[in-house]
Amino acid sequence: MKLVTIFRAFSPAEAQLIRSRLEAAEYHPFVVDELSALSVDGYSMAIGGIRVQVPESEATEARALVEAGAQAELPSEI
């Protein structure tokens, strides 16, 4: 099974939140590089973030779900 990165985070909490949202929608996410980022200060920045990956067959729909969630969290204009 080929995994595709659909999201990158610089905090473990954000990566786990995205993983949780994807699992709730019945996708099969994996969080990659989280333990390395926790072990060494600055490591997540050096490698480009903690990656959230899903199987290639789920990538398009899972990415759309993550992006839709990000749009829903933006504050409305005054």
Image: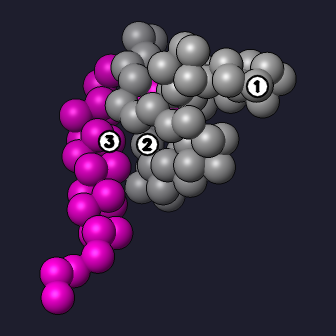
Q: Amino acid at mark 3?
A: Ala
* Residue 68 shown left or right of residue 39 in the figure: left
* Residue 62 shown left or right of residue 17 in the figure: left
**Where residue 27 is drawn, which disc sits there?**
2
Q: What residue is shown at x 37% (from left), y 20% (from top)? A: 4
Task: Say what secondary structure mark 1 lies in.
Answer: loop
Q: Is residue 35 above or below residue 24?
A: above
Answer with mark 3 or mark 1, whichever residue precedes in sequence.
1
Residue 68 position in % (x across, y down): 25, 57
Q: Quadrant of the N terminus?
A: top left
Residue 3 position in % (x across, y down): 43, 17
Query: Is residue 72 covered in magenta?
Result: yes
Which residue is denoted by mark 1 in the rendering?
41
Residue 74 position in % (x across, y down): 29, 69
List the single residue furthest toward the right. Answer: 39
Answer with mark 2 or mark 3, whichever residue precedes in sequence.
2
The secondary structure that most of the magenta stretch takes on is helix
Density class for disc 3 (Cα within 10 Å; few <14, some 14-19, many ≥20) is many
Whether tag 3 and tag 1 are in contact, CB under 8 A, the answer is no
Q: Which is more foreground, mark 2 or mark 3?
A: 3
Q: Is residue 16 visible?
A: no
Which residue is denoted by mark 3 in the rendering?
62
Which span is picked out in magenta? 52-78
Q: Amino acid at mark 2?
A: Tyr
Quarter holding residue 63: top left
* Residue 43 shown left or right of residue 71 in the figure: right
Answer with mark 1 or mark 2, whichever residue precedes in sequence.
2
Q: What residue is shown at x 56% (from left), y 23% (from top)? A: 45
Quarter holding residue 37: top right
**Cα distance between the residues tagged 3 and 1:** 29 Å
